[in-house]
Every structure is written in C-alpha cells, then in structure tokens.
C-alpha cells in the first residue's frame, strides 16, 4: 500500500543485534546464544535479521550459517565489505537461508576516503559498483551501505547510490555511522539524497543511526518522516560505542504516534519485553532502569499524584499500555511520594481491608518507614500490618 506521496506505508525493521549489537565492547555471543536470539527476533517480527559479518571469524561464519539454515519467515542478512572475498564468504554462509540478503558497504565521506581507504572518489564508486554486481550474481536481494554517509558530500553520495542502483542494489542504506547528525538536518539530508539519486524509486531507502549524541532514535524517526522505509537498529540499543537506535523505541514511537506517521511495521510488540530480557541476559548488558519502553521504571509510578491518576485512568500518565509491549501491568511503586489511594489499593491486593482508623495509623507508619527506605515492598507492608496494626 502506498501513501499519497507514492511511498509505501510499511516501514521495514532491520535488526542488527547479532552484528552491530555484538560489536558492543565486552559482548561476545556463542553460536547457541545467537540462535536463541535469532529465534526470538523472528517471533518479534523483525523483517530482516543481520546475523553477523561472516568474514570476520570462523565463529561468526558458523553463526550466520546456522541462523540461515534454521530461522524461517525472515530475511537473513550477512555483512561484507565491498570486495569479492567478503561477498563470496557472506554468500557461503547465507546460501541456505529462505530469504538471503547480502549487505555490502564502503565508506563515502572524504575523511574515510583519505585516511582509512586511501582511495579517491572514482575508485570508491568503482569498488561499490563491482561489489553490488558481484553480490547480485548470488541473490536478488542486495543492500548497499555508504558508511559515514551523513558526513559525506550529498552530490557525491547521490552519484554513488545512482551507480549502485544501476548495478542492481535493491536497498540503499544511509548510516549516521558516528552519531553526528541532528534530527532536522538528517531529515533534510535524506530528502536531498532521495531527490538527487537517479532510480531511487526502484529501491528501499534505509537508515542506520548510532547514538553518540543520544539521537539515534530521534534521527531514525526524522528519517522515516522524510521518506526512509527501512530502519536499522538493535534490541535495547546495544552496539558499537554508545550503541545503535533502539528498535523497541523506534517501533513504539511509530505506533504511539500513528496520528503523525500513519505507518505500520510487522512487529509483534507483545514480544518486546521478552526479547529485551533475553538480549540483556545473554549479552550481559543490563538495561538501565529508566530506559524507554523496556526499563524497570518505564511503567512504574511513584508519586502520589501520578499513582492516583493512573488508578483513576491509566492514560493520565501512560502513553503506552504496558501489556502492548509484553509487560503484565503498570507498577505502582510504594515510596515516600505515594498517596493513600495507592497504599489502600495495594493493601487490598494483599488481602487487608482495614478500617478507616487502622488505615490512618498504617499510612502514618508507612510514611515514616518510606522516609528511611527508598522502596517499600509487599513484605514490608505485610510486616507493617501484621506486627504494628493488627497486634496493637
Ligand atoms: O555504522 C555503520 O555505518 C555500519 C555499516 C556497516 C552499515 O554499521
Ligand atoms: Zn553501525
């Protein structure tokens, strides 16, 4: 389906938890762990699953091959630099996938050309075109990424993209490799690339944002607003340096603000929390408590005013239903900011229906305890009622 602007209403979600996510310092997943995550990503409904970078190690090759052989219902991608050896190796690993994608890349910014590649602009175009042509001999699904695209000259970038599209690329990816872009600027950049690139209407435009300035999700959403229809990122936003765009945030942003975007994804949002927990436990990377969508506090309310509001009507202080992301219910945390309403409700849930007098006394004791202890647990409440109220 397309919107009035000729663009599809569907945003494809490209997960790179097993490739860029695994590039997080200190993270190394074995083949069984990768398979577990890949199976869960398929349940989550990602469209494309980048299983690894096969040329980098035997372990990565074997993991990509195992995912390609086993996981169904999703496109499996493998990364390759723009050279034949990487591409041959990626294909060897991917060949048994139901829907294989070769993802090849080369940098296009002058800073990378001069210091890293030591190639001139024409040589990079030549390498990119040769790589895409070679990959197309293996599969009809070839993604080309222009590394450090956001710091590249836009006219040169459009030339590179135009040439790789002619050579057969089906997805062109515009990474903000070093997390340098600002949302408005990135949206304008995407529009310019789309206007200037010949043949752009034949391919899916993708973005891949890093989080060095904490803007990976904002930049991804800005790019979607400008016309991108594939977003790359990772679960919990893990990845190289400060990480990648957190896919659960991108998807819930699109979902929650359908009034603005009018776009859909194939995500089964109810699998979000389970996926986040699995990735956190297997990578050993904890999720910060205040992390959007999946953090321990994302649906927790502590202040009395907020608790009272949520008890009366959830949407007063919640823009997403926790059940929608696979979290059983909102969590009213009892602490020093909590009010009588939440306190009484929690006691009732624990089976205590106190008289008004008992409740007054219990609430006073609870406030005194909360001044000393940050979070009051159900055990604390039980002890308070049993020892201090019922035995008076
Ligand atoms: O950040 C980046 O530019 C990448 C590319 C390989 C897509 O990870
Ligand atoms: Zn990256």
Image: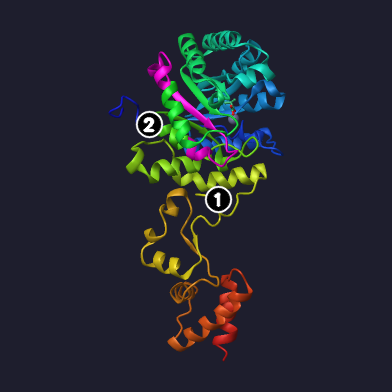
Q: Would you say residue 120 sits in the magenta stretch?
A: no
Picture coordinates of residue 366 (x, y %)? Answer: 55, 79
Picture coordinates of residue 76 (x, y %)? Answer: 53, 26
Residue 185 circle label: none
Could you tell me which secondary element the residue under label 2 belongs to? loop
In this view of the protein, can residue 12 be seen by the observer?
no
Residue in view at x 57 percent, y 89 percent: 391
Near-viewer residue (204 or 322) = 204
In this view of the protein, can residue 219 be seen by the observer?
yes
Quadrant holding the N terminus: top left
Question: Where is mark 1, residue-wise?
Answer: 291
**Quadrant of res 238:** top right
Picture coordinates of residue 224 (x, y %)? Answer: 42, 33
- Horizontal side of 200 relative to 76 (left or right) equals left
Q: Would you say residue 217 sits in the magenta stretch?
A: yes
Residue 10 circle label: 2
Relative height, residue 281 to residue 137 (above, below) = below
Residue in view at x 48 percent, y 72 percent: 346
- Closer to the chain start, of discs 2 and 1, is 2
Q: CA distance from mark 2 to mark 1?
A: 26 Å
Residue in view at x 49 percent, y 9 percent: 167
- Horizontal side of 241 relative to 162 (left or right) equals right
Is the residue marked 1 within 8 Å of ligand 2, measured from its CB? Answer: no
Chain part drawn in magenta: 194-219
């Amino acid at each position: 389906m397309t919107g009035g602007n000729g663009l599809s209403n569907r945003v494809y979600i490209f997960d790179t938890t097993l490739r860029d996510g695994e590039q997080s310092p200190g993270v190394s997943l074995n083949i069984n762990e990768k398979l577990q995550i890949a199976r869960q990503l398929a349940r989550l409904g990602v469209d494309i699953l980048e299983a690894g970078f096969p040329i980098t190690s035997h372990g990565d090759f074997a993991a990509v091959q195992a995912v390609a052989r086993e996981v169904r219902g999703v496109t499996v991608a493998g990364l390759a630099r723009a050279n034949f050896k990487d591409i041959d190796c990626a294909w060897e690993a991917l060949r048994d996938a139901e829907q294989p994608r070769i993802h090849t890349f080369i940098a296009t910014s002058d800073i990378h050309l001069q210091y890293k590649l030591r190639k001139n602009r024409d040589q990079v175009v030549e390498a990119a075109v040769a790589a895409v042509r070679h990959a197309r001999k293996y599969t009809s699904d070839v993604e080309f990424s222009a590394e450090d695209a956001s710091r590249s000259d836009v006219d040169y970038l459009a030339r590179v993209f135009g040439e790789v599209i002619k050579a057969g690329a089906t997805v062109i990816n515009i990474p903000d490799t070093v997390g340098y872009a600002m949302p408005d600027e990135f949206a304008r950049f995407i529009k310019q690339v789309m206007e200037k690139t010949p043949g752009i209407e034949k391919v899916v435009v993708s973005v891949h944002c890093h989080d060095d300035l904490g803007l990976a999700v904002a930049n991804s959403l800005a790019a979607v607003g400008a016309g991108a229809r594939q977003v790359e990122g990772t679960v919990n936003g893990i990845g190289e340096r400060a990480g990648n765009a957190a896919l659960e945030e991108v998807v819930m942003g699109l979902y929650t603000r359908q009034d603005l975007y009018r776009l859909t994804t194939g995500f089964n949002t109810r699998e979000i929390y389970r996926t986040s927990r699995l990735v956190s436990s297997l990578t050993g990377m904890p999720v910060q408590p205040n992390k959007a969508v999946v953090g321990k506090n994302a649906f927790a309310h502590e202040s009395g005013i907020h608790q009272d509001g949520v008890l009366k009507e959830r949407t007063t202080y919640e823009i997403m239903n926790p059940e929608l992301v696979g979290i059983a219910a909102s969590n009213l945390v009892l602490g020093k900011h909590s009010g009588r309403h939440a306190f009484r409700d929690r006691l009732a849930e624990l089976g205590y229906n106190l008289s008004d007098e008992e409740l007054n006394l219990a609430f006073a004791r609870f406030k005194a305890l909360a001044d000393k202890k940050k979070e009051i647990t159900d055990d604390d409440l039980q002890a308070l009622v049993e020892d201090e109220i019922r035995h008076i």
